[in-house]
Image (spheres, rainbow, N blue to C red):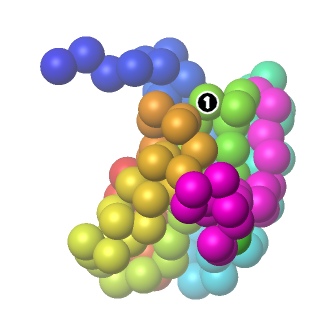
């Protein structure tokens, strides 16, 4: 299976490495979100933070969510700072993808229990 937006994915991964290297462990999700946004913009991406997603049913708004980051209007990044990613985190991202029709979502965990990050 080929990865879509392969070049963008690897640049995003590079940005995560840089953020983790500079910040280390222990911060809340918002700190990593802001740092990653800065790093991605530095790499030339267009980044939107906390973009509102409207959930429609029969053309009526029935709910709203906020994505952590949207990159180049084609990749959703959902950040976590938890011990381990679980099926609920994955379901949240899949719902965002379904609601926006964006094809690629990246779930990133800046866990306080490990040196690197989970992607």
Would residue 34 appear left or right of 24 to someone viewing this image? Answer: right
Q: Residue furthest left?
A: 1
Depth check: give the residue in front, 119 or 49.
49
Q: Residue at x 44, y 59 (%)?
A: 95
**Up-down relation of residue 37 to residue 66 (above or below):** above
Depth check: give the residue in front, 69 or 36.
69
Secondary structure under tag 1 reads loop
Where in the figure is residue 103, as x and y percent of width and height? Answer: 46, 32
Where in the figure is residue 54, as x and y percent of width and height? Answer: 69, 60
Q: Residue at x 54, y 51 (%)?
A: 99
**Up-down relation of residue 107 to residue 28 (above or below):** above
> Does residue 8 appear in this view?
yes
Q: Residue at x 68, y 62 (%)?
A: 60
Q: Is residue 9 magenta?
A: no
Would residue 32 appear left or right of 20 to someone viewing this image? Answer: right
> Does residue 20 appear in this view?
no
Q: Residue at x 50, y 72 (%)?
A: 80
Where in the figure is residue 45, as x and y percent of width and height? Answer: 76, 28
Magenta stretch, main secondary structure class: strand
Circle 1 residue: 74
Where in the figure is residue 62, as x and y percent of width and height? Answer: 64, 72
Would residue 62 appear left or right of 39 to someone viewing this image? Answer: left
**Up-down relation of residue 112 to residue 89 (above or below):** below
Q: Quadrant of residue 51?
A: bottom right
For the N terminus, the quadrant is top left
Q: Which residues are magenta?
A: 45-63
Depth check: give the residue in front, 95 or 104.
95
């Amino acid at each position: 299976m080929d990865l879509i937006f392969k070049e963008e994915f690897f640049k995003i991964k590079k940005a995560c490495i840089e953020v983790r290297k500079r910040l280390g462990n222990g911060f809340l999700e918002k700190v990593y979100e802001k740092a990653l946004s800065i790093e991605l913009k530095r790499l030339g991406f267009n980044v939107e933070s906390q973009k509102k997603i409207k959930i429609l049913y029969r053309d009526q708004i029935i709910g709203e969510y906020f994505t952590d980051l949207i990159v180049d209007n084609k990749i959703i990044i959902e950040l976590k700072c938890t011990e381990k990613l679980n099926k609920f985190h994955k379901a949240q991202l899949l719902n965002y993808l379904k609601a926006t029709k964006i094809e690629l979502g990246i779930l990133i965990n800046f866990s306080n229990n490990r040196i690197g990050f989970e992607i």
